[in-house]
Image (cartoon, helix red, strand yellow):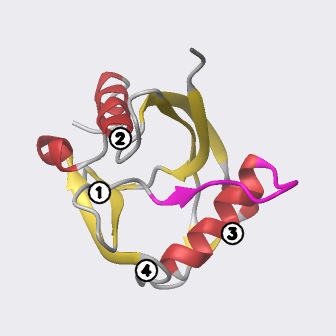
């Protein structure tokens, strides 16, 4: 049976050796901010819109850089559902504020990666291996 794939664009923003993460209302795990595309959106357009919706900041389009695509079983979905996340780094302007479905903003260090979704844990390992965090 074919697996269902959920596509997402996510922001990987590192400060003081921790990665910007968010937690939605009614969720236990943290995840990197971003979300699913709307009809006709590019991955970068999705990133810009989702970050504005979730964190109330404006991504600088010229600063967006592709980091990689990662996949894992999707949290809170049946076992045959995968999340495939296109990750980007980018700069933004404004002050971070939880908005829309976001309940909490946190800076998660590698040592607390277990508080994150499975795909995010895979990304934490990649960030460590590539010396972007320690």
Residue lying furthest right: 40
Of the pair 117 and 20, the residue shown nearer to us: 117
Give the left or right position of residue 80, taking residue 63 as reference.
left
Residue 47 picture location, percent across and down:
65, 58
Pointer 2 residue:
120
Asked whether the residues under the numbered discs 1 and 2 touch, taking CB atoms below 8 Å apart as contact, a structural biologist would say: yes
Graded by Cα atoms within 10 Å as few (under 14), some (14 to 19) or many (20 or more), the crowding at tag 2 reads many
Q: Which residues are magenta?
A: 33-42
Pointer 3 residue:
49
Is residue 36 a member of the stretch shown in magenta?
yes
For the residue labelled by badge 3, is the local secondary structure a helix, a strand or a loop? helix
Graded by Cα atoms within 10 Å as few (under 14), some (14 to 19) or many (20 or more), the crowding at tag 1 reads many
* 3D distance between C-alphas at marks 1 and 2: 8 Å
| Residue under the image location 31 percent in, 44 percent down | 117
* 3D distance between C-alphas at marks 4 and 3: 14 Å
Specify which label sits upstream in the sequence, 4 or 3. 3
In the image, residue 132 sits, relative to residue 17, either above or below, namely above
| Closer to the eye: label 4 or 3 | 3
* 3D distance between C-alphas at marks 3 and 2: 20 Å
For the residue labelled by badge 4, is the local secondary structure a helix, a strand or a loop? loop
On-image quarter of the N terminus:
top right
């Amino acid at each position: 049976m074919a697996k269902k794939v959920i596509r997402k664009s996510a922001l990987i923003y590192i400060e003081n050796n921790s990665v910007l993460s968010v937690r939605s209302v009614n969720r236990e795990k943290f995840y990197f901010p971003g979300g699913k595309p709307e009809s006709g959106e590019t991955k970068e357009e999705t990133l810009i819109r989702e970050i504005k919706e979730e964190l109330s900041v404006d991504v600088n389009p010229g600063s967006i850089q592709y980091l990689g695509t990662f996949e894992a079983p999707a949290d809170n979905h049946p076992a045959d559902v995968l999340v495939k996340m296109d990750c980007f780094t980018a700069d933004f302007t404004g002050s971070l504020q939880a908005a829309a479905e976001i309940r909490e903003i946190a800076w998660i260090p590698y040592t607390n990666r277990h508080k994150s979704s499975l795909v995010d844990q895979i990304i934490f390992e990649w960030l460590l291996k590539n010396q972007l965090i320690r």
